[in-house]
Image (tube, rainbow, N blue to C red):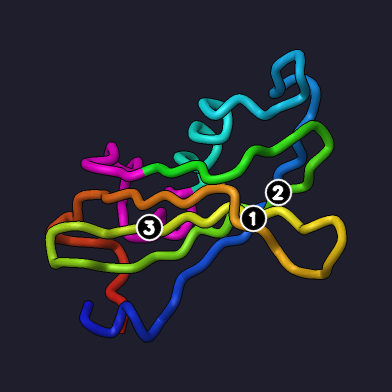
């Protein structure tokens, strides 16, 4: 699986911040965002497992900005590999800046999943 870095497996998911997931001041609850990105982290690796994706063995989560009601977020999940025992998925959550055509990073995360001895598909 050394060629995994060359074969980028990436998923982009749109997420609209609604009143249901915000506090009374209109800010997105961090635990809601964490739950969402934890689920999205499994998307690029599902094909490596015969059954359900195993539980996360480690993670880092850093929220650098706030998201507000009606913000349209993009959750990007990219499969990377740090060692032969884990599949690592990097998450970047962005939202468009209002006055320019650039994206603003509001959250970064890294999730580690155990690499099973016999994955379904070999990446070559």
* Left or right, 101 with reference to 91: right
Q: Where the C terminus falls, by quadrant?
A: bottom left
Q: In which quarter of the image is residue 90?
A: bottom left
Name the N-terminal-most of marks 2 and 1: 2
Residue interval drawn in magenta: 41-60
Secondary structure under tag 1 reads: strand
Locate residue 38, reporting x and y percent.
Answer: 45, 40
Report the mark closest to the observer, 1 or 3. 1
Report the mark closest to the observer, 2 or 3. 2
Locate residue 107, reporting x and y percent.
Answer: 53, 48
Q: Does the magenta stretch include residue 48?
A: yes
Residue in the image at 67% along x and 29% along y: 28
Which numbered dot is residue 73? 2
Residue in the image at 76% along x and 40% along y: 16
Residue in the image at 82% along x and 69% along y: 101
Q: Where the N terminus falls, by quadrant?
A: bottom left
Would you say the residues marked 2 and 1 are in contact, meaning their CB atoms lie under 8 Å apart? yes
Q: Mark 3 points at which residue?
A: 89
* Count of numbered badges drawn on the protein: 3
* Left or right, 107 with reference to 122: right
In front of the other: 101 or 88: 101
Name the N-terminal-most of marks 1 and 3: 3
Which numbered dot is residue 94? 1
Residue in the image at 21% along x and 82% along y: 2
Locate residue 93, reporting x and y percent.
Answer: 58, 52
Secondary structure under tag 3 reads: strand
In front of the other: 24 or 16: 24
Secondary structure under tag 2 reads: strand
* Cα–Cα gap, marks 2 and 1: 6 Å
Q: Is residue 91 magenta?
A: no
């Amino acid at each position: 699986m050394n060629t995994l870095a060359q074969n980028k497996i990436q998923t982009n998911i749109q997420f609209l911040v609604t009143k249901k997931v915000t506090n009374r001041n209109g800010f997105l609850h961090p635990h809601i965002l964490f739950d969402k990105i934890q689920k999205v982290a499994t998307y690029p690796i599902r094909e490596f497992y015969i059954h359900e994706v195993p539980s996360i063995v480690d993670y880092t989560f850093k929220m650098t900005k706030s998201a507000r009601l009606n913000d349209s977020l993009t959750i990007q999940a990219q499969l990377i590999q740090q060692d032969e025992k884990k599949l690592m998925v990097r998450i970047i959550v962005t939202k468009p800046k209002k006055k320019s055509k650039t994206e603003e990073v509001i959250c970064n995360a890294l999730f580690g999943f155990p690499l099973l001895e016999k994955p379904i598909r070999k990446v070559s």
